[in-house]
Amino acid sequence: MIRILALLVLVIPGVIAAYGIKMMRDMVFGITLGPFTPSLLWLQFISGLLLFLAGLAFIGGFILHRDRKKNKVQGRFKIDNKN
């Protein structure tokens, strides 16, 4: 059950990142989506870029956190808890 939950936690940001890529691609071809008008295609691209980066950052942070817990990261990624 925990693995299914972890998969869902990764799938949702993945879908968000994929939609961001779709928004950026549609802007290149001049296709407007949702609330954007043809004069605001640049805003559609920026929104798509933000969605893509947010999804990618979440997935990357999730994987880094998991690998730190399992002690599978290089020395430069380890957290030093010395105070």
Image (spheres, helix red, strand yellow):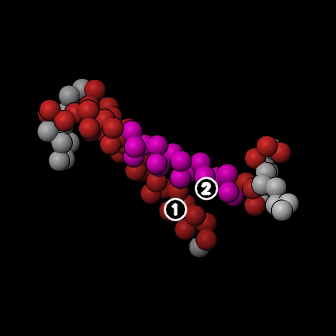
- Residue sitting at 73 percent across and 54 percent down? 67
Residue 3 sits above or below residue 44 on the image: below
- Residue 9 is tagged as 1
In this view, the residue farthest toward the bottom is: 1
Judge left or right: residue 19 versus residue 44: right
The Cα–Cα distance between marks 2 and 1, rounded to whole angstroms, is: 9 Å
**Is 58 in the magenta?**
yes
Crowding at dot 1, Cα within 10 Å, few <14 / some 14-19 / many 20+, comes out as some
Quadrant housing residue 74: top right
The amino acid type found where label 2 is placed reads Phe
Q: Is residue 10 visible?
A: yes
Residue 39: x and y, percent? 14, 32
Q: Nearer the viewer, residue 45 or 6?
A: 45
The local secondary structure at tag 2 comes to helix
Judge left or right: residue 26 versus residue 82: left
Q: Quadrant of the N terminus?
A: bottom right
Q: Main secondary structure of the magenta part?
A: helix
Give the mark nearest the N terminus, 2 or 1: 1
Q: Nearer the viewer, residue 22 or 55?
A: 55
Residue 38: x and y, percent? 14, 33
Q: Is residue 22 visible?
A: no
**Is 19 in the magenta?**
no
Q: Residue under circle 2?
A: 62
- Residue sitting at 52 percent across and 62 percent down? 9
In this view, the residue farthest toward the top is: 29
Discs 2/1, front = 2
The amino acid type found where label 1 is placed reads Val
Q: Nearer the viewer, residue 72 or 47?
A: 47
- Pointers 2 and 1 in contact (CB under 8 A)? yes
Residue 58: x and y, percent? 53, 52
- Residue 22 is tagged as none
Q: How many marks?
A: 2
